[in-house]
Amino acid sequence: MRTAPIAAVLLAASAAAQMHLIEGEKIRPHVRFLAHDLLEGRGVGQRGGQLAAQYIAAQFAAAGLKPGGPGGSWFQPVPLRIVEAAPGARLSAHASGKTLEWRWLEDFVGTSHQQLPAAQFDAEAVFVGHGITAPEYQWDDYAGTDVRGKVVVLFTNEPPSADEKFFQGRALTYYGRWTYKYEEAARRGAIAALIIHTTPTASYGWQVVRANGRPQPQVRRKEAEPALAFAGWITEQAGAQLAALAGERLDDLLKAADTRGFRARPLGRVKIRGRMQFRLSDVETENVVGFVPGSDPKLSQEAVVLSAHWDHLGVGEPVNGDSIYNGALDNATGCAMLIEMARAWASMEPKPLRSAWFVAVTAEESGLLGSRYFAENPPIPAARIAAALNFDSYSPYGRVRDAVLTGAERTSFYSAVQSVARRHQLTLKPDPRPEAGGYYRSDHFSFARTGVPAFSVNMGNDYEGKPPGFAAEVGKKTAARYHQPTDEYSEDWDFSGLEQFARFGFALGVEIANLETLPARADAR
């Protein structure tokens, strides 16, 4: 894991010199532009999203990168199908002559994974707990139950435990993610799946789930793939109504789902009926891809990938008269930092040993679609990607003393990461909310799924020179703006923290790119 002495000195000097060219005030104008109302929230398949991708490509070119898309282009096409629920979507439950009618957005929301113009079902409701089949934990919520053609009702998350050997204790595994729930329900042949939302089990409020009512980009489905006619959520209140219709209590259902030995069971005699129309449109969105060749004839065939997602939620439901979901923090900040890291990398002489690929990915907000497409269709074999570092959502309120590198501890070069953190006078902190499953909710996970060591580079919350309680106030502001039109750029923002972490991320990438040999890969998934 060492470079030759003379080469190491030259490479280190080059990296140090160029790192200091990364400045907060160079990052600022990118954030200002990418979060401007003119870009209309950078929606996938929308004009504003296309403008964002073109802007990033132009900045990559100006920085001195080479185009990394097919045919010498800056763009890797990602074929998506937009599925939009038409007005009048209906979902209800009925049993013993009683009927519950739920309201779109207020009580339920969702989409179709079959990618057909309509979905209709009137099927038995089966409660499947957390909807998990995990042989390694001796857990199978579906054991002995045939749910083909039925509607499965479940909670997100997973059975709680303090035992680190059981679903990794407090930390969420992929089994707890809503994406897994729908995948498993489809594999089991269910016609629809309804997740009962609670803030504790989801780790976010209903206002975040409501975003699923917008047009949903999906990777175009292959005909033979299993898919749900409706993949939906219902509110906690609607879940309580459903439980009562079946003669149950919602709290009792969750308690049963958390108990070892749980087995799926019908929800009394309840049937769930859905009548929905969907507008379908195919779009060609794109990942923006550029690269800087490495300096070593052999090692330049390997690469470090640095990524950030350019998309946000576009134009949606107005909140206090504002319908543009600008996504200034999420993720104009990460894209701006990616541009300036790319500029610094391209200007290094000598270049690092390995190549560097800079990728601004699309459709993160729709389930990491762009990064997954890139990871499964990389320009070089996945086995040659030394590491993938992701940058997503940064706090413009000053410098911090700590960093949270979500997933770095799962990789076999964590000691090198720790060394870089020490040089940058940053204390590495563990994920403060592992139960929220952040590891599975950012684009680095798309790379980890293919076996690439991958992690996200996140700021901590120990702010320099700030009074007690400052971090808590920042947390409240950020939470209130998350996926809301209020996530807008402000001229009074302090970009020193973004400068700090762009330099840190740059140094991490260079460190890995300059390792003479890489350690054997660990399974980071």
Image (cartoon, helix red, strand yellow):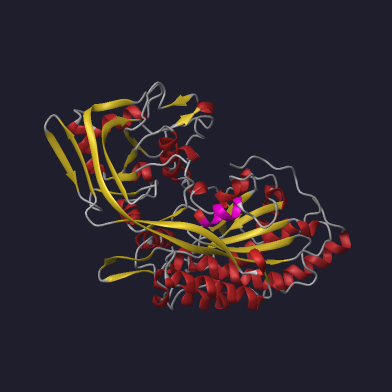
Q: Is residue 183 left or right of residue 315?
A: right
Query: Where is residue 255, by image quadrant?
Result: top left
Residue visible at 67% across and 50% down in the picture: 382
Instruction: Tell me where residue 146 appears, x and y as whole percent.
Output: 37, 25
Q: Is residue 422 left or right of residue 274?
A: right
Instruction: Tell me where residue 417 appears, x and y as whole percent.
Output: 67, 53
Instruction: Tell me where residue 298 appears, x and y as whole percent.
Output: 83, 57
Residue 266, can we see it? yes
| 251 relative to 333, above or below | above
| 328 relative to 410, above or below | below
Numbered disc total: 0
Residue 23, can we see it? no
Q: Residue furthest left?
A: 97
**Main secondary structure type of the part rendered in magenta:** helix
Q: Does the magenta portion include 373? A: yes
Start-end of magenta stretch: 370-376
Query: Where is residue 427, by image quadrant?
Result: bottom right
Query: Where is residue 488, by image quadrant?
Result: bottom left
| 415 relative to 357, above or below | above
| 29 relative to 475, above or below | below
Q: Is residue 307 left or right of residue 333?
A: right
Q: Quadrant of the C terminus?
A: top right
